[in-house]
Image (spheres, grey):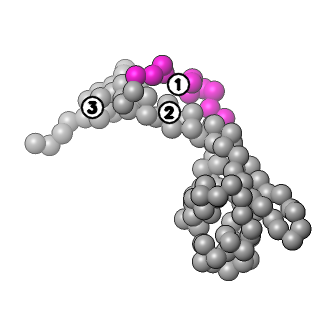
C-alpha cells in the first residue's frame, strides 16, 4: 500500500451523501448499469435494457434511483436519452473508504477498538 497522508477527519463525513450513493450502488443491476456506462461515453436507453437484460420498466426504475443519487445524469436529445456518470458524487463515499483503508493500514493486525485504544484480538493457533 502507498504511503499517504491520513485522509479526512471522520467527523467531516457527509453521512447523507455517502449513504445515498451507497444505496444507489446497492443492487447488482445498478452496478451493471454503471459498468456499462463506464464502457461508453453515453448511450441510448435501449442499449442499457439490452445489456442488463431486464424489462424496460425495471431498468427505468434503476436509472431513476441512480439519477436521484446524482451518480448518473441524463440528457434528452430526442429520440435519444443519453446517460453519463458524475464521478464527483462519489467523493463522500471515496473519503469514507480511504479512512477505513488508512485505519486498517495503521492497525496492522486485527484489533478490538476500545476507548483505551487498540486491543489486539487473540487468534486461535
- In terms of secondary structure, where does tag 2 sit? helix
Q: CA distance from mark 3 to mark 2?
A: 18 Å
Q: Which residue in the protein does label 3 denote? A: 109
Q: Are marks 3 and 2 in contact (CB under 8 Å)?
A: no
Q: Earlier in the sequence, mark 2 or mark 1?
A: 1
Nearest the eye: 10 or 40: 40
Q: Quadrant of residue 103?
A: top left
Q: Nearer the viewer, mark 1 or mark 3?
A: 1
- Disc 3 crowd rating (10 Å Cα; few below 14, some 14-19, many 20+) is few
Q: Residue furthest right?
A: 78
Q: Which residue in the protein does label 2 denote? A: 98
99 versus 46 height, above or below: above
Q: Earlier in the sequence, mark 3 or mark 2?
A: 2
Q: Is residue 99 left or right of residue 47?
A: left
Q: Earlier in the sequence, mark 1 or mark 3?
A: 1
Residue 92, given in percent of the width and then of the height, sits at 63, 37
Residue 12 highlighted magenta (yes or no): yes
The span shown in magenta is 3-15
Q: Which residue in the protein does label 1 denote? A: 7
Residue at 89 percent across and 68 percent down: it is 78
Nearest the eye: 56 or 50: 50
- In terms of secondary structure, where does tag 1 sit? loop
Residue at 59 percent across and 40 percent down: it is 93
From this viewpoint, is residue 67 visible?
no
In which quadrant is the N terminus drawn?
A: top left
From this viewpoint, is residue 125 visible?
yes
Nearest the eye: 54 or 10: 54
Q: Residue furthest left?
A: 125
Amino acid at each position: 500500500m502507498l504511503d499517504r497522508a491520513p485522509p479526512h477527519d471522520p467527523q467531516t463525513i457527509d453521512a447523507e451523501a455517502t449513504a445515498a450513493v451507497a444505496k444507489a450502488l446497492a443492487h447488482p443491476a445498478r452496478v451493471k448499469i454503471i459498468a456499462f456506462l463506464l464502457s461508453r461515453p453515453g448511450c441510448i436507453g435501449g442499449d442499457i435494457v439490452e445489456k442488463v437484460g431486464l424489462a424496460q420498466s425495471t431498468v427505468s426504475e434503476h436509472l431513476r434511483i441512480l439519477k436521484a443519487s446524482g451518480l448518473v445524469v441524463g440528457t434528452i436529445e430526442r429520440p435519444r436519452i443519453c446517460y453519463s456518470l458524475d464521478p464527483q458524487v462519489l467523493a463522500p463515499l471515496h473519503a469514507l473508504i480511504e479512512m477505513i483503508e488508512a485505519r486498517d493500514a495503521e492497525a496492522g493486525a486485527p484489533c478490538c477498538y476500545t476507548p483505551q485504544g487498540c486491543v489486539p484480538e487473540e487468534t486461535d493457533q
